[in-house]
Amino acid sequence: MAVLSKEPMKNVFAAAVALTLAACGGEAPAPAAPTSAVPAAPAGGLGAAAPASTEEHVAHVDVPPATRAVVDAADRDPEDKKLDAGRKPAELLAFAGIRPGMKVADLAAGGGYTTELLARAVGPTGVVYGQNSPVIIEKFADKPWTARLAKPVNKNVVKVTRELDDPLPPEAKDLDAIVFVLFYHDTFWMKADQAKMNAAIFRALKPGGVYVVVDHSGRTGTGTSEVQSIHRIDEAVVRKEVAAAGFKLAADASFLRNPDDKRDWNTAPFAAADKRGTSDRFVLKFVKP
């Protein structure tokens, strides 16, 4: 990472705080998902007419009993469980198709809320690569992340501290799934190279492996202009960039959609206050051909 001036470093620290709070603090319950999927954002770039879409629109995610049991486990931390209403982790695990024995990765893991859920879902025969960038570890996530990894249930988690341009070590290959939750937008103001990042993710997955991106929806046409000011991104940007890396968009899900969200307020935990956990969020599943 390039050397940052004093003012950008303050912004980096603020984002690190936001990330860790999101991983360790409570969220307000998310509104009920609409009965039908929200129409897909144009995949041809900002302002482009939407082409014919072949991906599946998932209005309701069927959660297998085994996946529900992972989320309902009695030994999960109560602070983690406070996040569940706003995050809907059972639906996320089911949508990503996480099963015992898989090799998966959690990018921008923060304090490890999602990482632990993945570890529980893949079980002792699976592997989870939990990645954080050095600046996040240095400024805020070190203690909660270290405490998370010390838990016996996370003994199958491999700690990864790398820049997002190349987020996974060489041995992380032929992965079944990679998830990137509520952080893709931050890669822009943190000056990551999204093309390199997505290419590295593509290489790490096996053919047929899935890349699931969850993020706060920006208003159509805003592109990346509000990734730092209100921590949102136009869905069309993510669709276009990930497709450019060679992925096929297989499905989008509506379990974190909120049609009442005007998408004009700051989703960072320290700024969202009682709106926290209620933003309109897109959930996209890409597949490596």
Image (cartoon, rainbow, N blue to C red):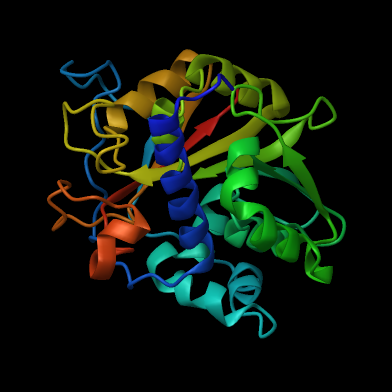
138 horizontally vs 4: left or right: right
Q: Quadrant of the N terminus?
A: top right
Residue 231: image x %, image y %? 31, 42
Q: Please tell me whether residue 286 is drawn above or below residue 212 in the rendered image.
A: above
Residue 219 pos. (x, y %): 17, 37
Residue found 70% across the figure and 82% down from its top: 75
Decide if residue 282 is on the left or right side of residue 61.
Answer: left
Asked whether 130 or 286 is in front, the reply is: 130
**Between 228 and 261, the one nearer to me in the picture:** 228
- Of 232 and 241, which appears nearest the observer? 232
The quarter of the displayed image where residue 87 is located:
bottom left
Q: Quadrant of the C terminus?
A: top right
Where residue 86 appears, as percent x and y from the top left, is 38, 67
Image height check: is 214 above or below 156? above
Residue at screen point 66% across, 71% down = 66
Rendered location of residue 209, percent (x, y) = 65, 34
> What's the residue at 16%, 26% (across, down)?
221
